[in-house]
Image (cartoon, rainbow, N blue to C red):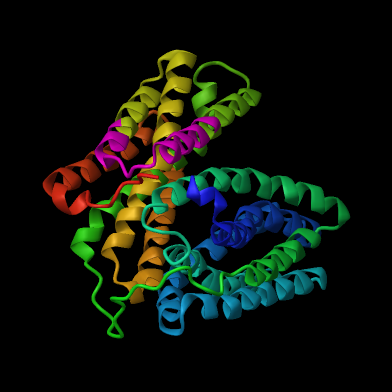
Amino acid sequence: MTLLRNSGYWRWSAGVQLNRLPATMAPLAFTVLTTATTGSYRLGGVMMAVFVAAEMAGAVPTGRLLDRVGPARGLVVLLPLVAAGLFLLAAVASAGAPDWALLGLAIPPGLVAGGLNGGFRTLLAATVTDEELPRAVSVDAMILEGVIVGGPLLVALLATSGPAVPVLAMAVVALLAALLVPRRAVRVDPQRTVERQAIPVAACVPWLAGLFTVGLLLSTIEVGLLPLVQRLGAPDSATAIVIVVLCGASVGGSALYAARGKVGDPRLFLAGFVLGGIVVSAGFGWAGLLGGVALVGLCTGPMMAVSSVNLQQLLPERRRSEGFSLAFTVQASGFGLGSLAIGVLPVWLCPLLGVLAALVSCAMLVAHPRRAIGTPSVTS
């Protein structure tokens, strides 16, 4: 594959993974920090909620700013601002600041960080060719699994050196990401226009719905793992088995998608979500739980990839950071709603919300098949 020899892609990948790492470290890092400095682990959870809310609120405005100044130039400036906010938070917490001050200081880095993934995703379009794009997104999804698992492990390791060290490490990682922002594009679109065209919202909605489905279904499974396992009469430690199956299936699905090298029919992946969610909800013993989770995992990477590739085709070049920031926010809202559902609904019912979302997404794609599928496949 030509992608493996594309040094620009690997520079981009290193930068985007470092940009994502603080978000995966934050839940445990904030909990460690507040438990040591205020004695309340609950405050860490509230801080994380505030941080995520700030990310969602700032995603689209930050993405719009990146489109105006240029994603590469904007990321080089904004990532150090995120680092400065995290440095300040760690310093103030170490000084024994009150709870309200810690909650307030979690807002600025969250507001800035919310749109940075959209900026990085926009740069990918200038780093790889159209033919390499499906594979590039799939390989990125595989690496992301390692970042999601590695973030908490890194926090656990760093916390042995002091409660503020993980948050300081988050700041350092943000600075390192700024150093790896791609500065030079591999190709320039000759049709680029100076005018800011309107985002075709109606055409984007099916793909946004697909990303929302991914977030909703995954969160109902991941957050609800403990009650799902307890329903089978198994010990709490058995949740590790389900996590391994889910992560392994997700990596495997992305690898197969990358190896095939074609965009694929998203309705097939949504059908996998429907079947997998129903099986998990029905509770057919261990075989049903692991089989359903594996099917959802296999379809997760490909669905995210095909949605990302098609959104790129639809978004105007000078509004891609804004559009991708909106897409990440929609997916995050799915995660949030799924987590909320676990707290208020019976555990068997929660995966069915993801099933319903998948059916709605599939209906949208059936209604607009030509608009949904039109991205070139990989031939090399």
Q: Nearer the viewer, residue 131 or 327?
A: 131
Establish if 80 lies above or below 223. Answer: below
Q: Tell me, yes or no, whether the highlighted magenta stretch contains residue 366.
A: no
Query: Which residue is depicted at the point 36% across and 21% down?
Result: 282
Place of residue 21 in the rendered image (x, y in percent of width and height, measured from the top left): 63, 56
Q: Residue at x 22, y 52 (%)?
A: 374
User: At x 20% / y 59%, what residue is drawn?
Assistant: 203
Q: Is residue 81 left or right of residue 169?
A: left
Pick the quarter of the image with the C terminus: top left
Relative vertical location of residue 350 with respect to residue 313 in this rendering, above or below: above
Q: Residue at x 52, y 36 (%)?
A: 251
* Number of marks: 0
In-front residue for pair 54/7: 7
The quadrant holding residue 239 is top right
- Dividing the picture into quarters, in which one does residue 347 lie? top left
Query: Viewed as shown, does residue 173 lie left or right of 361?
Result: right
Residue 195: where, in percent of width, then height? 27, 84
Magenta residues (range)? 248-271
Q: Identify the main secondary structure in magenta.
A: helix
In this image, 314 relative to 68: left or right?
left
Expressed as whole percent of the image width and height from the top left, the position of residue 286 reads: 49, 15
Residue 379 visible in rendering: yes
On the question of residue 344 being in view, the answer is: no
